[in-house]
Image (cartoon, rainbow, N blue to C red):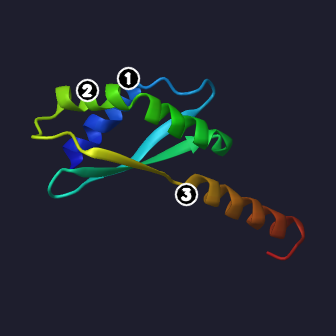
Amino acid sequence: MQRFRDALALVLAERVEFPKGALVTLVDAVLTRDTRHAKGTISVLPVSMEEACLAAIEEYRPEINEGLAEHLRLRRIPRLHWETDHTEENAASIDAEIQRLKNEGQL
């Protein structure tokens, strides 16, 4: 599982041209037992560029599959499904709320 995650992160970095100004990080990758499907979770900053980054991943799907084939020895390349992670955005929102409460003297 770790090998798949590392290979996918490497392939994304090498083969996908993300929109200028976007910071994309592979947070997690899970491969099904039969290797037919995999789910990749990415974090995108700024959040407003999520859709553009997901579109770039879709556009570069053949290159991603080719890169995975080069780095992994699987009988089949899995069908990749993508989702975005909002942990950083949620943490920033919580930090801002804590700071607001401190400024108002409620904390």
Q: Residue 99: x, y in percent? A: 78, 62
* Quadrant of the snapshot with the C terminus: bottom right
Q: Amino acid at mark 2?
A: Glu
Q: In the image, 42: left or right of 7?
A: right
Inter-mark Cα distance, 3 to 2: 30 Å
| Circles 1 and 2 in contact, beta carbons < 8 Å | yes
| Circles 3 and 2 in contact, beta carbons < 8 Å | no
Q: Which residue is mark 3?
A: 87
Inter-mark Cα distance, 3 to 1: 25 Å
Inter-mark Cα distance, 1 to 2: 9 Å
Residue under the image location 51 percent in, 37 percent down: 24
Residue under the image location 43 percent in, 26 percent down: 16
Q: Which residue is mark 1?
A: 15
Q: Earlier in the sequence, mark 3 or mark 2?
A: 2
Q: Residue 91: x, y in percent? A: 62, 59
Q: Residue 97: x, y in percent? A: 76, 65
